[in-house]
Image (tube, rainbow, N blue to C red):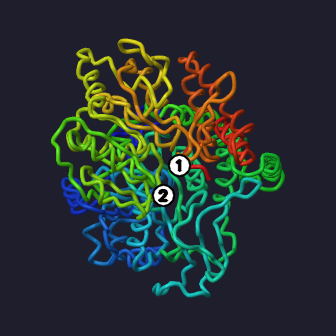
Amino acid sequence: MALPSPEVGRALMDPASANRFEAVGERGAELSEALSAAPTGTRIDVCLVLYQPHLELLALTFSGLEHQENLGVVRIHDNGATTSRAEVLRYCPASLRERVVYTTSDNAGFAAGQNRLIEGSFRAGASHALVLNPDLQLAETALSDLRAASRELDDRHLVSGVILFGDRGEIRGAPADRVVDSAGIEWTASARHLDVAHGRPMASLSLEGTSRTSALTGALILVPRRAWSRVIQLSGEFFDEDFFAYREDAELGLRATRVGVGSYVTSRVVGMHYRGTPGVSRKSALVNRLSVQNRFLLRYRTGAVGRPGNLVLSLTRDVAVAAMVHLRERDSLDGLRNARRLRPRMIEKRRRLAAAVERPEAHGSAQTWGLRAAELTAPHAGRVESDVWIIIPAYNPDERLVASVTHLGSQFRVVVVDDGSGAAFAWSALEAAIVLRSATNLGVASALNIGLSYALAHGAQYLVMLDQDSQMTTENVRNLVDVIQGDDQGEIGAVGPGSVAHLSYGGVSGEAGLIEVPEVLQSGMTVRREVLEACGLMDESLVIDGVDTDFCLRLRRQGYRVLADPRVRLEHQLGDSAEQPARRIGPFRPLVTHHNPTRRYYMNRNRVRLLRRYGRVEPRWAALTIRRTVVGDVMAAAVESNRREKVRAILTGLRDGMLGRSGRAG
């Protein structure tokens, strides 16, 4: 996994910091190297950062690891060399000792120590890294439960579970009288972060399955390689090392959400945390100082408006904290000074993150963005050998998909990606297609990436994307592919149909020759392998709507041409359903599409995001997009059904677009 470029942020390990890390334990290093050479299946490396550890509690942590499934290497980093490897291993079961990789350095903080351990895990071939405190004992099936929850989320997000306060005994299920330590992190109106359900009886917790939360406690986080890669590529670091310790987990949750990586908690009890008395503060002078410092670092990093909570209440508390420090808690003055000193760096990080979220193509590639389609099921193999692959994302399709696959599958490889439809559709009817099925609905961008990644991994040279309700003849597919194949100079990034249904696209209908346009519709868009490898796949943070626009404008920004072929006409359903198709009304013939409120939200949010991303370099496209958006929103509010919900969705989408929000709504 390549490290982020200097433009994104600081390198995870520069030569100076690397020299401060002393590898201890040759056997552990040999094991790590061997695992790196031949990684297979699921392997979870455990990452422990020590600083003056309580060795008896560390022994409980080791005991919880001893019989876990999928356990890889136990990576230990001693911050400040506060103990010795021999002393630590004396408390480690014999069966684990050969798995331990032990390093030490000057005290760089919890965030820096964990960053280096996590990076080492993935460099050595681990599929997941488990951030773990040295005073937390895992439940007997913790790794299996966490892995199952992560698999349900396609390894795209950070995962934890219910953590209870420990009593130094063995874990036997989840007694109702046990007390919860953490079930995630939540934010108050005054921008304080608190552990969800902290100090409450287990019986009072009403969690089912896997639920989303604002962030996860740094005491236990399962980090899939894919989620780590996404955070690293777009923000430059995993934990923010300027936070040193305390609040670094809450900040990570906010930043990860910005780049489309969520925080989830499974309802299963995954461990016991032995940290003092439930509900009683553990604050010391050092924790108070870091708490003050990191409160203001968080404000500078997110901006006052971007920070969780109520703006007025959070700023009021900022003033109160600063006043309290000056009047009573003067030991924390260094925290305020450090925050002010680091303020320019936090603002620069905020700026770079915003730029990366707006231009993800600058920080990713086909390899980075590609999803691991091999982990999905592929029950049918295509029967035609060909360099041309057709990718069709599908969600609750109908018989039109069967007809399209049957027709196109006679001459081309066809990949259908079921985007979490369920069992209602007879997928076995798609005998001419390779069917990849996702357990959850991921969105059009992710579904396309699954299919594209699968096709690329199996040798595809030319890729045609279609919607499930689009109909295209094999002749038209060949016309589009011929355009790409005839491009000896490699100037064409994408080519698409010249007309869709009864509407001309880009003003090219009926004209001879190829016409250069700002964008073509995703359905029918045809690209070559080299373009995807150079420019990356679809931006998954858009989810749906604007995915094709972003891709085409990204190609143009990188010097490629986007063309429409007037010879090719696409039969495609415009509008929300066959019962309410798109139509033009009135003397000025505006298009009424009857898109539902969810689509209205994404259309408005993503158009605002794309206008901010490309508006200055594509002024003609920007003007047309603004006009199209205004007309579409007015029609939705004036003549379509369900107007109140659509207006609410439109306004929410515009707001979220201005705030730079991405990923799935809600």
Name the secondary structure under disc 2.
Answer: strand
Figure check: 466 above or below 87: above
Image coordinates of residue 652 in percent, x first then y, are 69, 43
Residue at 39% of width from left, 71% of height from top? 143
Callouts 1 and 2 close, C-beta under 8 Å: yes
Spot occupied by residue 59 in the image (x, y as percentages of width and height):
41, 77
Residue 337 visible within the image = no
Residue sitting at 57 percent across and 36 percent down? 582
Q: Of residues 315 and 508, which is closer to you in this image?
A: 508
Residue at the location (27% across, 47% down)?
406
Question: Residue at 64% across / 25% down in the picture?
Answer: 589
Q: Tell me the CA gap for discs 1 and 2.
A: 9 Å
Q: Which residue is at the front of the view, 78 or 379?
A: 379
The residue tagged 2 is: 158
Q: Amino acid at mark 2?
A: Leu
Left or right of 127? Residue 461 is left
Amino acid type for the residue under numbered disc 1: Ala
Residue 345 shown left or right of residue 230 in the figure? right
Front in this rendered view, residue 119 or 420: 420
Quadrant of the rendered image containing residue 465: top left
* Rendering coords of residue 657 (x, y %): 64, 37
